[in-house]
Amino acid sequence: QRQKRIRNFCIIAHIDHGKSTLADRLLEKTGVLSARELDDQVLDTMELERERGITIKAQAVRMPYRAKDGEEYELNLIDTPGHVDFSYEVSRSLAACEGAILVVDASQGIEAQTLANVYMALEHDLEIVPVINKIDLPSARPEEVRQEIEDVIGLDASYAPLVSAKTGVGIEDVLEAVVEHIPPPVGDETAPLKALIFDSYYDSYKGAISFVRIMEGSVKEGLDIRMMSSGREYPVTEVGVFRPGLTPIGTLAAGDVGYVAASIKNVADTRVGDTITAVENPAAEPLPGYKKVNPMVYCGIYPADGADYEDLRDAMEKLQLNDASLMYEPEVSTALGFGFRCGFLGLLHMEIIQERLEREFDLDLVTTAPSVVYKVIRTNGEMVLIDNPANLPNPAEIEHMEEPMVRAEIMAPPDSVGTIMELCQQKRGIYEDMTYIETNRVTIRYRMPLNEIIYDFFDSLKSRTKGYASFDYELIGYERSELVKLDILLNGEICDALSIIVHKDRAYPRGRAIAEKLKDVIPRQMFEIPIQAAVGGKIIARETVKAMRKDVLAKCYGGDITRKKKLLEKQKEGKKRMRQVGTVQIPSEAFMSVLKMD
Ligand code: GTP
C-alpha cells in the first residue's frame, strides 16, 4: 500500500544545534541535491535568514530513499521555524507530520527551546527520533547528552544516531531511524478532501502557493477548491512536490505533502492552518487548530528622509505579499511626519522586517519604541485595545488598564542564577519555580510583563550570563496593572514619537534615563533646549541642552580646504538625518536611543 512507504517529518532543535546543516546532508545523501548545489543552504531561502542563522519560513522537500529493507521510501522533510515568534506556524507544520527528528548538540546538551519544541511535538502526538549532532567537536560528550535526553525528556535515546552534520558521519543512520521509528501516515483517500495549509508564499507567476499536507481525499489539477475559513473558491492550476524546486505531479492524495497553486492573488487568502476542501463533495468540518494570528508587538516605522515615504510604502507592500502576518497602516506623527504603524508576531519578527527594509530596499528608517497591546477599560465600561501610546485615552477616562503577561523560561548554568533573578526582578518578574537539570543547568521560570521583555531583556540576559543562558516565552494572558504614559517634551512641546507606556513605579527612573540620553544625542542649537519627562502633565525629570557658543562655527574658517570640505560634507549628511520637532532639530538616533535603556 502506498502510504506505508511515506514518512512525513520535521526537524526540531535549539538554534545553532545544526538543524539546517543536517537537513542539507539528508538532501545530499538522498541525491536530491549535489554537494555543490548545497553551497547555499537550500531550506533557508532568504539571505537574511542565512546570515542570522535563523529559519523563518517553513518549506518542504520530498526525498526518495531506498532503505536497508530494500523498499523505496518517500521522505517528506518539513522545515519549521525555530523561534517562539512563529510558534503558531510551527504548530501547523508539526500537525502536518507524524514524527520529528530532535537534533541535540553533543557539546551543549538540552536547552530551553529544545524542551519547548519537544513539548509542542508531543502535543501533536509526534514520534520523536533523537539525533546527537556535532560529535566531531572536541568538546562533544555524546553519551552524557544521550543520558540527558532520557532523564530530562524521558525519550528512549538508546538508538539515537551519533552524527556530525558537518563531516557527514552517521547521516544514513538518521534516514534509517526515520523509516524505522516514524509511523506512516493514515487517511482515507476516498473521503472528501481535507488539506492542511502549513505555509504559503507568493510566486509572481503562479500566485500564492499553499504548502499542504493532504489529510483525507485527494486534489488534482482542474479541481475546484474552497478555503474553509473564508469560503473563497478557486480552480487548481498546479499540484506538485518540492525536489527541491517546484515539480508538478498532477495529483496529491491522503498522506502526501506538496503544494497547490490556484492563481490566488494574495497570500492572505492562503492562511496557515486553514483547510482546503473541494467545492463538490466538501468536507463537513475543517481540520482543528486553525487560528488567525494577531500581532503582539507594534512600532512606528518612518523614513529617515520624508521624501522616501512612497518607497517605504512600496517596500511594505512587497514584504506583505509574502508575509501575511505583517500588519501595517499609515500613521502620522507630529515629530516624524508620514510613516506606518506596524504590527509583528514578536520582537524577532520586528527585527527581521526592519532589517529587510533597510537592506533589501535600501531604506533609512526611524523606528519608534516597540509597544505591546494594552487593554484599556474606560470609565464608561467600554474596552479598547491600544498599541500606540499616542492613542491612550485621557487618564480621567480610564477605569483601569491591563497588560499582556508571559511565562518566561530561562535555562542557564547554576552560577548565573543570582544575576538572572536580579534581572527578572528588575523587569517586574514574579518568580515561579526553579528546577535543576543535572548539576550543570537549571531552568528558572518567571511570570513577566511582555512590555518589559520587548526592550532589551534578551541582550541583558546574554551579557549577564556570557551567552550561556537560553530563553523562551509564551503568552499567558492579560493582568491588571498600574500603567502610565510617559511623555517627553522638547522645548515645551510633547514629542509624540517618544511617548511610551510604562509601569508607574518605573516611570521616574525611565523618564530620567531618557532625558539624560537625549541630552547627549541632541546637538547644541542656537538656543537653549529644555528636555522634560512628564507623567500626566507632571514633570518628573529635566535636562537642558545648552545653547551653542558662537566660536564653534569659527572652526570652519581658515585651515586647509579639504578639511573644510569634509566638514561641510559631514554637515550635509547629518542634516538629512535630522528631524524638525517644533523648533528643535533632533537626530534620528534620538528615537532609537530610548530603546536601549537600563
Ligand atoms: P538555526 O537555523 O539558527 O535554527 O540553526 P540551525 O539549528 O539550523 O543550525 P545550523 O545548521 O545553521 O548550524 C549552526 C552552526 O553549527 C553552523 O555554524 C554549522 O556549521 C555548525 N554545525 C552544524 N552541524 C555541525 C557538526 O556536526 N559539527 C560541527 N563542528 N559544527 C556543526
Image (cartoon, grey):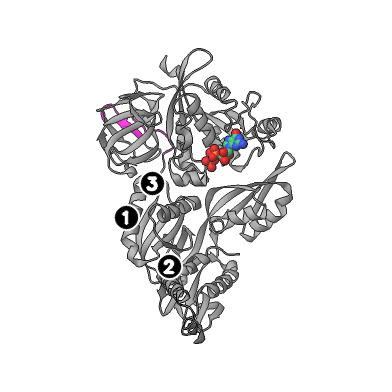
Range drawn in magenta: 275-290
Q: Which residue is mark 1?
A: 314
Q: Which mark is residue 390?
A: 2
Count of all numbered marks drawn on residues in the image? 3
Which residue in the structure is indicated by mark 3? 323
Residue 368 on image: x %, y %: 46, 63
Image vertical order of residue 449 relative to residue 492, above or below: above
Q: Secondary structure at mark 3?
A: loop
Q: Secondary structure at mark 2?
A: helix
In the image, is the residue at mark 1 within 8 Å of ligand 1 by its beta carbon?
no
Left or right of 439? Residue 326 is left
Classify 518 as above or below 164. Answer: below
Question: Which numbered disc, 2 or 1, marks the residue that appears first in the sequence?
Answer: 1
* Quarter of the image where the C terminus is located: bottom right
Q: Residues within 10 Å of mark 1 (few under 14, many from 20)?
A: few
Q: Earlier in the sequence, mark 3 or mark 1?
A: 1
Q: Could you tell me how far apart the alpha carbons at marks 2 and 1 are, in whole angstroms?
A: 26 Å
Q: Looking at this view, is 137 or 321 the one in front?
A: 137
Which quarter of the rendered image does ligand 1 occupy? top right
In the rendering, at what x and y percent does residue 15 appear?
Answer: 56, 42
Which tag, 3 or 2, sits closer to the chain's start?
3
Residue type (three-letter) at the residue carrying disc 2? Ala
Magenta stretch: residue 282 in it?
A: yes
Q: Magenta part mainly helix, strand or loop?
A: loop
